[in-house]
Amino acid sequence: MPRKDVERALKAPATGSKVWQVLATLIATGAHFSSGYALGFLSPGIPLLREQHFPDLTTEQEGNLGSLMLLSATLSNPLAAMLADSRIGRKGTCILTAIPFVICFGLNAVFPSSLAAHYIARLLVGLSAGTLTVVCPLYVSEISELSIRGTLNSLVVIMFNSGLFVAYLAGVWIKSFVMLSVGGLICISIFIALCWLIPESPEFLLKNGRKEAAVRSLRWLRGAKVDLQEEMKYMEISQADTEKVESSTLGKIVRVFSTPSLRKAIFIPMTLLFFQQCAGIIAVLSYASSIFSLVGLETFLA
């Protein structure tokens, strides 16, 4: 099939069911829900930690608890790319990120009086959060149709913010640091249980020479009645073109900065994220309860 015919067919309105794509996206982004919970956890968690386990917790130590997660998240990005392209795959990497979450909330629950345990927990959860920032949107992009790809990728942010909101809400009703940590364990446990139900990315499977597995994955995502021939052909053409250009790491970098659309796709989000971070949004989200308490708002409302 000629390339133009394939691209024209893909741009036409899709006739397959989107239910399974939405379901797979909701499950995969469940890990981002835990990332949001882990970030928002500090807001109600630090006052409870000071009240119940560390009455002499210093401002510097509070700052360390917030910054360690961001530090390890930044360092985890190269690791995320390597894991996603390895035999572990996109889905496998998402599942792998659950392990640090379990250890993090487990350490918080079992060793609430150990500051070292809390530091280790924040470093570990940062590794997972940073890895998910790379891998989860990649997985969602590769399993979704062009017509709903942007919509489904927006669920990554929605689930993160939902986890953040639930952490704040839990802090209103749960007055125990240990039980707040158990809440995080419950969230990530649900993700682990459900993630085994969804397929690996068909593009990743095809890239690794597993065409039959890619077809099965695509069939699960698109439905039994959809003709997959055109989409599979498009994926094969796309990957062949990519392999020609990206035969090496240098080739990948050259392609990114030599393609106007890719340069724009990098520049716009990087600029937005830069100014977002400069505005201090992470500090506000992490210490919202303490900030509002300092301005005189009641602890319950803060």
Image: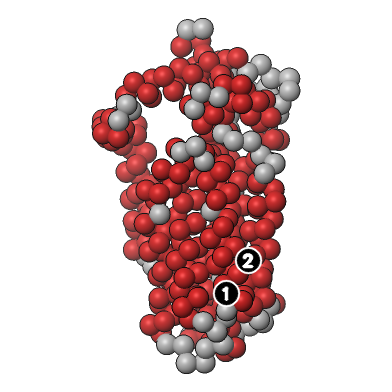
Determine the residue positioned at 49% across, 27% down: 208
Residue 271 in the image: above or below residue 167? above
Question: Height in image: 118 above or below 98?
Answer: below
Judge from the rendering whether residue 42 lies leftward or rightward of residue 179; answer left or right.
left
Residue at the right extreme? 224
User: Which residue shows up at 44% across the image and 66% down it?
Assistant: 123
Which residue was labeled with disc 1? Answer: 108
Q: Position of residue 201 (x, y in %)?
A: 56, 34
Rounded to the nearest angstrom, the CA distance separating label 2 from label 1 is: 10 Å
In x, y percent, where is residue 25?
A: 62, 42
Q: Would residue 119 be found to the left or right of residue 145 on screen?
A: left
Q: Position of residue 222 (x, y in %)?
A: 67, 27
Q: Amino acid at mark 1?
A: Asn
Applied colour scheme = secondary structure
Amino acid at the residue labelled 2: Gly
Between 105 and 262, the one lying in front of the other is 105
Q: In terms of sequence position, does the residue under pointer 2 or pointer 1 come before the other?
A: 1
Residue at 73% from the left image edge and 20% from the top image edge? 225
Rendering quarter of residue 189: bottom right
Q: Which mark is residue 184?
A: 2
Question: What residue occupies the far front of the structure in this picture?
Answer: 87
Is residue 138 among the parts visible in the rendering?
no
Q: Secondary structure at mark 1?
A: helix
Mark 2 lies on a secondary structure that is: helix
Say which of marks 2 and 1 sits in front. Answer: 1
Count of numbered badges drawn on the protein: 2
Pointer 2 with pointer 1, Cβ within 8 A? yes
* Depicted 207 relative to depicted 173: above or below: above
Q: Which mark is residue 222?
A: none
